[in-house]
Amino acid sequence: MNNDGNLKNPSGVQSVERSLDIIETIATEPHGMGVSSISEATGMSKSTVHRLLATLLERGYVEKTEDSIYKVGLKLIEVASLYLNSLELHTEARPYISKITRDLGLTAHLGILEDDQVVYLEKMDILSSVQLYRQIGLRVPAYISSLGKCLLMRYSHDELESVLKNCSFQKLTDNTITSMEEFHNEMNIVRQNGWAIDDEESAMDYRCIGAPIYDYRGDIIAAISASGNLSLIPDERIEFVANYIKDTALEISRGMGYSE
């Protein structure tokens, strides 16, 4: 039992548990609660409630009205929404990722952006036995990835500068983009086309073509791509693969509630 009279898990961090108690308590009242009501409902002292609310308020997990009523903040809603979107994204995208591999005979990817890197949520290869192989969690720099270029489409010129401020633009091949100015030019083309290509930028004899996935708000939340060596994606096949991936990304987006 702690100083406020509540039984707590001795292995837990007390302040975290108390903060969660406050959030869960406030969430039950759609019109919000004052400090006294929160204190009474949680068994914590008012000073403790005040202290924890200050941190939660600063982080956006609670909001405070002019008459000192506290409600669940937008940050909590955003975090929950991201989690739900992630679950829905996997459900919607997985059959299409498999279909890309079957229809095109190429490696298919699903990825999201984390800082200046792409994180693969799905990667499927078609093997000689026509079995699917998945790899989750692989990270690649966004500037050399068709997925990354698609995910960065949502940013303005200044926002791109901020997101990629620590990007080294390491030269991996003769085709690698090596400067911010060059990347801005590339992004103008990507926005115009609605799809992106890694044209031997990350590795020689390798191409990857991607397109963005949108959610119900029209925000880019993920991207899909198809990749292979130049014999599988020769110059004359680029447009066909790009249109296929773009159409597939649109189908997934519609499943996420997107409407053009």
Image (spheres, grey):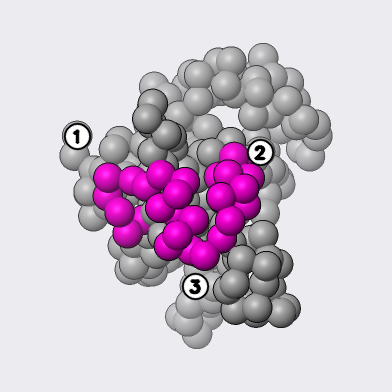
Left or right, 27 with reference to 56:
left
How far apart are the two marked residues, 2 and 3, measured between alpha carbons? 29 Å
- Within-10-Å neighbours for mark 2: few <14, some 14–19, many 20+: many
Residue 124, x across and y down, in percent: 50, 68
- Is 224 magenta? The answer is no
242 relative to 166, above or below: below
Name the residue carrying label 2: 116
Which mark is in front, 1 or 3?
Answer: 1
Characterize the local packing of mark 1: few (<14), some (14-19) or many (20 or more) Cα atoms within 10 angstroms. few
Q: Is residue 46 magenta?
A: yes
Amino acid type, residue under disc 3 in the picture: Ile
Q: Say if mark 1 contacts mark 3, CB within 8 Å.
A: no
The residue under the point 52% across, 49% down is 112
Q: Amino acid at mark 1?
A: Glu
Percent across and percent down for residue 198 are 58, 40
Say which element carries label 3. Answer: strand
Depth check: 220 or 198 in front?
A: 220
Q: Does residue 98 show up?
A: yes
Q: Which one is earlier in the sequence, the residue at label 2 or at label 3?
A: 2
| Residue 149, horizontal then vertical, whole percent | 54, 35
Stretch in magenta? 27-56
Q: Which mark is residue 126?
A: 3
Disc sitting over residue 260 in the figure:
1
